[in-house]
Every structure is written in structure tokens, then in C-alpha cells.
Amino acid sequence: MVVFDLAGSVKDFRNAINRIDGLEFLSELLGDQSDPDDDFHMTEREAGRTDKRVTHSLYLVMSNTKAIDELLRLFTQWQADPSASFEHGLGKFKTAFQQLTAIRRWGAEDRIRETGLRERWEETLSMVGQSVSTVLVEVELWHRRDAAQRAAAEAHVEEVITSSAGRVLDRSQIGEIEYHALLAELPIQQVQSVLTNGASAIRLLTTDDVMFVSPFAPMSVAPGTLEPVAQTQLARSDRIEGKPRIALLDGLPFTNHDALQGRLSIDDPDEIGENYPVAARHHGTAMASLIIHGDLTDGGPPLDRPVYVRPILQPHEFMPGYEQVVPNRLLTDVLHRAIRRIVKGEGNQPAAAPSVRVVNLSIGAQTRALTRRMSPVGRLLDWLAHSYNLLFVVSAGNHTDEFTIPADAAHDTDAARLAAMRAGFESALLRGILPPGDALNALTVGATHSDGLGEIEVPDTVWDITHPDAPAHYGSVGPGVDRSVKPDLHHSGGRALYTRPIVLPGQTDVAVGLARTAATGPGLQVAAPGRGGATNSTVFTNGTSNATALVTREASRLFDLLESDNRDPKTHRFLIRNITRCSCVPSLPMQAAGAPGRTACATILVSMARTLGGS
């Protein structure tokens, strides 16, 4: 397998390289940009040469050794004498080679450079040392068009894994997005070899059939609190009839909670609920509560349709109250199967909820923030949205680690607020969008520092250092793939307070972390599992998950308006121009890019227009 480092147009290059038998384009990676020079620069028809930065791309191909050797021979021949004659049919290579900076073979370092594997393994050894005996990795293979070649490649990679005392736990092939992957368990000795001797030290990372190897850690979410929480009076309703429009893929909610009773349609083909105690049902309960009721503090009207729920989280094996995406399963495959079950059915079963038009995904893959290449699960959502006319509303993801501000700023709230903002800008590269929020065809939602609780008394031990209604410090920041605007919009995520640090003499910097406010607020008030059979417990929470659920709720309301006359284009245009009641706002880059005053509801409406029909 070889890599072409290119600059500028590659149309002729692709046409020419397809003439060599045995070569097949398998993937394309967007590379870094560089300043133009005399050799590589962008031109425009009228203006000629411009000063625009030049985008380099990596085009990756797999082939047999003979074909690769032939290609390298041609490039070496051209470098020695650009005027040399090529064999019949290969003349276009000369034009293509003029755009090349290098040709090289895909190596072990390429397979882990942007996956965070080395960093995660270093963290694993530093935190747990020898207390773990295995690690999990997602091994993404080059997707071949030929089924026999895919089978042979998978068998070879599995042999490589088992020969090193590892094992394959899950596997998936989704041809529509060119996804072919294995979930593997490797012995800890493999980690030590890579960290000590480099990526080429283990056979898996030198196997030609492997494209990327990523650390695998199922997304986990912590409960707001395990202590007794506030109780609220909510009228229990009769069972809501009708076809669901919204699908919630999340944890299993507490279905008997006063806020949710009779309003959910649970579909649990994997029987996750059999080992899902009520006390662990935090995240799904909160998201269902926000979708149906919004912030309970506001007392808004509930949705008049049931919400379809497919559990994809389960209780964490070791951490009480925590929930995690189903372990030992590839998330891309889990979501693919879940959506197909909703719209197409599974096996001999008919479609579980074909009326669903909006899918809420308040989850994020914590191990891989967006780099230059869209994640497999992001590609999956793009394809599913296009293929099945679905609107995916996806969380941008949270980064809740402590951040550092100058000690001098910790003595004054206004100074701390400014310092926190600067710290956010400085750490933006480390707070990238989490998959599947990198999908282009999904609405990716960030969180603002707002909720419905109003003014509260803040104790001296905590402080509010986020500007009202500004993007929350914990939220992921863009850009998205190819510098697209991400998050697409922001919505209320719940205010987050921070623990006021104690500054010791001589300190120059202090760490600032989130304070626990689940029992008292601020935050969005949501339904929560209670103790002793209580069915009216609530907590206050914050996060981009909350904002995502609220946008999903707004989408349902807007769908009602669209469906009131869904055959009249004039009505659609009127709604897009005049919807102003929604409290979500477009991301600031969107406003700067030429959409001043456009509400985020209009953004939702535009995304929803293609989903009309069949609901």
C-alpha cells in the first residue's frame, strides 16, 4: 500500500492511476494546508495566481506488490528525467506526478498518528500500570470492493490478533460507508512494546490490510448525584397514543416516573433492561424528560406523541450509577442496526417505528475528537440521514477536565471570567467535536450557559465565571470536517458553576473544576430515579446532551407546524422566516458567515424540509 502526498487538482491523477491493473483507491484523507510557492499555488480563471493556502491530500491505495513496484518505478523514472517516455496509456502520469510531493508506503505510524492510540496507552499505563491485563482497540481495515478480498483480509488480521494472544470481540462491514472493522482485545504486553520500541514493534500495526487502529473505550456518563434529590409535583397522564416521531437512542429511562409514565415506547431487542436497575437509569431518564417536557422549571407543555426509546447504554460494571455504551460492541454497528430496525425492520420483523423522523443522540465517543478525517460513526449518520430521510440531532460532546487560570485572576470574579474565556481559546484544539457530532448531515448541538431557574444565591465556595447565555466552557468547539461550522447551533445546556480555588502563597496558576450542583441547581431540572420507590424525583444537570434533547423537542414542535400544511411551499418559507420563539441560537461563526438574525429554528426547519412525508 502506498501514499500519495498531493497538492492541487488530482482529477487527472486519479484517471491515470486507474489504468494500472491491481491499484484501487480505498480512502482519501484531507491533509494540512501550506503557504503557496512557485511550485504549488492556487489559480483563478481571471485573477491568475492567488495567495490562497494550498490543501494537501493523502490518497491511499492498496495493491499487490508488483503493481506498487511498477508505480514507484514510474515515479523514480520521472524524477530522473521528466521528459522520459512512458508506456502507452500511462502518459497522464506525467501531469499527475507534477502535483506530487512524495510517494511512500503506508506505515505503522500512519495507522495510529491521528487516532490517539499512543496517548491513550501512555495514560493507561500511568494510571493503572499492571493492574489490567488487556486493552481494547478498534481495528479499521481497508474496505475492498470485492467480498472475497474482504473476507481474506479479515481472516488475516484476525490471525495476526490471535497469534499475539489477543481475540476478536466484534466485527462489522457496512459497504455503503466503506467501513470494515474489528473490535479486538490485546494483551497489555502489546502496549508496552509499542511505547518502548515504537509502532512497528507489534505485528498488528505493520499489517498491510489495516488502515487505522484506535483505542476503544465505550462512552460513559456519570450521574448528577446518588444522594436524595428534590421532588416535584407532576400530574401522571394516561398513556399517550399515536405514532412516535422522535427516537431516543440512549440509556433506559425510568418508565414509571411521573414525568414519563405512559409517554415512552420502549424497544429493547437486546434485553438490556433485564439487568438495568432503576437506580442506574439516570441519563436516559434525563434525556426523555427534556424531550417530552423541556426544563421542568419552566413548566412547558409535554409532547403529545410517545417517544420511541432504543437503549444503547447499560449500567457500568464497576462504577455505581455510571452508564456506558454497550461494551464489546462497535458503536458504528450498534447504531446501524438500531436505525435499520426503526425504518426497515430486522430479520422477519417489520419496521419498529417507521413514523420516526428525528433521532436524538446525546452521546459522544470520548476517545477520538475530530482531527482531519470524519469518524466512521459520523460517516454512518451522513449516509443514514440521506438514505432514510432522518434528521439526526447530535451532541457536540463535553470536555469537563479542569482548566488553569492565573492565580492573580482568582481573587476577582470578573477577572476569573475573562481568564476562563482565554483558557478556553487556548485549549480549543484539545476540545474538538466528539463523534458522531462530526457528521455533516446531522445537526450538532452545543450548550449555552442558561436555564430556567433564574437568580440563585451562590455560596462562597463556588463561582459563576461564564457569561450569561454564552457557550459553556465545557462544550466541544469546532470546526468540523473541512472547516465546516460546528456546532451547528447552541441551546440551553444548564448553567455550570465552578469550585472557587484556594490560592496558596507563591502560586502562579490555579486549577478550576466543575462544582456539583445536581441537588440545588443551577441547571436544567430533569426527571431522575428516586429512592424508596419515589416517582417524582428530579435533579439539576448541565451539558451538551441537555441542549441536544431540547433541540429535539423544538424539532418536534416545528414538525407540527410544517405538517399543518406540508404540501404548501409558501407555508414552509413563511415558517422559516418567522419562527422566533425557539431559544436556541446558531453558532457564532454562522452569524459571521452571512446569516445575521437567522434563528436556529430556521436552521432546523431547513434540515427538516427533506424529511417531510411518510411520518
Image (cartoon, grey):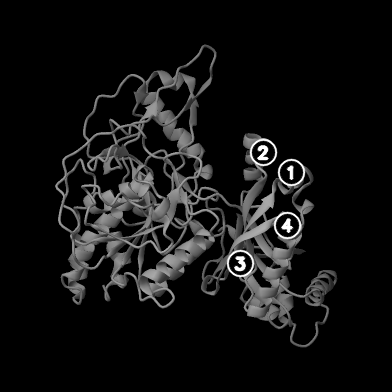
Q: Marks 1 and 4, Cα distance to the nearest angstrom?
A: 14 Å
Whether 148 is drawn above or below 181: the answer is below
Residue under numbered circle 1? 192
Label 4: few (<14), some or many (≥20) within 10 Å? Answer: many
Mark 2, Cα crowd under 10 Å, few <14 / some 14-19 / many 20+, is: some
Nearest the eye: 244 or 237: 237
Residue type (three-letter) at the residue carrying disc 4:
Leu
Query: Circle 3 sits in a helix, a strand or a loop, which is it?
Result: strand
Mark toward the viewer: 3 or 1: 1
* Residue 281 appears in the rendering: yes
Q: Which residue is mark 2?
A: 125
Mark 2 is on which residue type? Leu
Calculate the distance from the C-alpha at mark 1 to the C-alpha at mark 2: 8 Å
Closer to the chain start, of discs 3 and 1, is 3
Rendered residue at 82%/73% (across/down)? 69
Residue that carries the numbered disc 3 in the rendered image: 28
CB under 8 Å between callouts 1 and 2? yes
Alpha-carbon span between mark 2 and mark 4: 19 Å
Q: Position of residue 344 (x, y in %)?
A: 39, 75
